[in-house]
Image: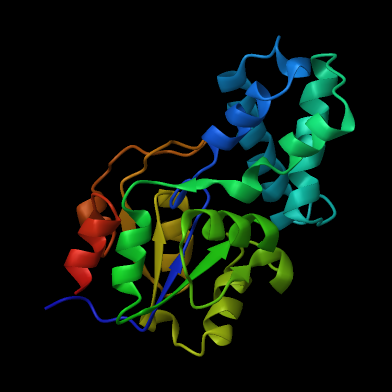
Amino acid sequence: MPIQVKTLLFDIGGTVFDWNAPLIAALSRHAAFAGIDPAAFALDCRAGFLDAAGSASRGETQRQSSDLMLANVIDGLLGALRVAPDEEARRDLHHAWRHMVAWPGAREGIERLRQRIAALPLTILSWSMASGSSRASGIVWDGYLCCEMMGLYKPDPACYARAATLVDCRPHEIAMVAAHPSDLRAAQACGYRAFYVFPQIEDPGEDYADTGFAREFDIVARDFGDLARLLT
């Protein structure tokens, strides 16, 4: 019998959407970025953003919008490389994560899941990033839970508790869906179920070593189609 939950809360950056490709695409569109290694720059952007988000979550730095956080990381990297693009090129790069593309099969899998279970992002990304990327990929959600709108950030336990209140569910009635083991473990510690989807891209600093995921998490799925099959 499939595991019964009332709400699925999705990590989306890296789990549903490819954060790497739009940064590389933005770099390729402007001559000012010609001397930059796009793959290395994209990885450094992601690492810097995650570091900044982690510092904000721990209260070490002032909280700010995810759009501003990414822009500051990008500007710092460009400054270190002594690259000074015009405003159009800079804005294009700043907004790259507003039109991330979903991994193959993600839209169809999420659509199938939503036929019987509410599905929402619970994300450290901004509303502009989450909604813009979802629209670009044709993904429809039952709402958005953006950490910056709640004033609480994953993996703070208060964030998961507040999300449960907002969707009017007890923690065990919710499953966190993520390709990041650390996100799932934080959610589990707050009483959520944990559904692991194999990563299509690996985040810098995340430990993906399989120490027994099939025992640790409630579901381990190859992709979103597999997750939908296991839950329906």
Left or right relative to 79: residue 54: left
Residue 24 versus residue 111 in the image, above or below: above
Q: How many marks?
A: 0
Left or right relative to 216: residue 208: right
**Where residue 221 sits: x, y (%)?**
24, 54
Q: Is residue 94 visible?
A: yes
**Where residue 231 sits: x, y (%)?**
22, 72
Relative depth, front residue between 23 and 178: 23
Q: Residue at image x 74%, y 37%?
A: 92
Q: Residue at image x 48%, y 61%?
A: 186
Q: Is residue 126 visible?
A: no
Quadrant of the drawing holding the C terminus: bottom left
**Where residue 156 sits: x, y (%)?**
61, 64
Q: Quadrant of residue 65?
A: bottom right
> Furthest-bottom residue in view?
168
Relative depth, front residue between 204 and 102: 102
**Where residue 51 sits: x, y (%)?**
67, 40
Q: Residue at image x 27%, y 43%?
A: 211
Relative depth, front residue between 111 and 230: 111
Relative depth, front residue between 51 and 157: 51
> Furthest-top residue in view?
35
Residue 86 versus residue 73 in the image, above or below: above
Q: Residue at image x 83%, y 34%?
A: 88
Q: How is the model colour-coded?
A: rainbow
Left or right relative to 106: residue 17: right
Q: Quadrant of residue 229?
A: bottom left
Quadrant of the drawing holding the N terminus: bottom left
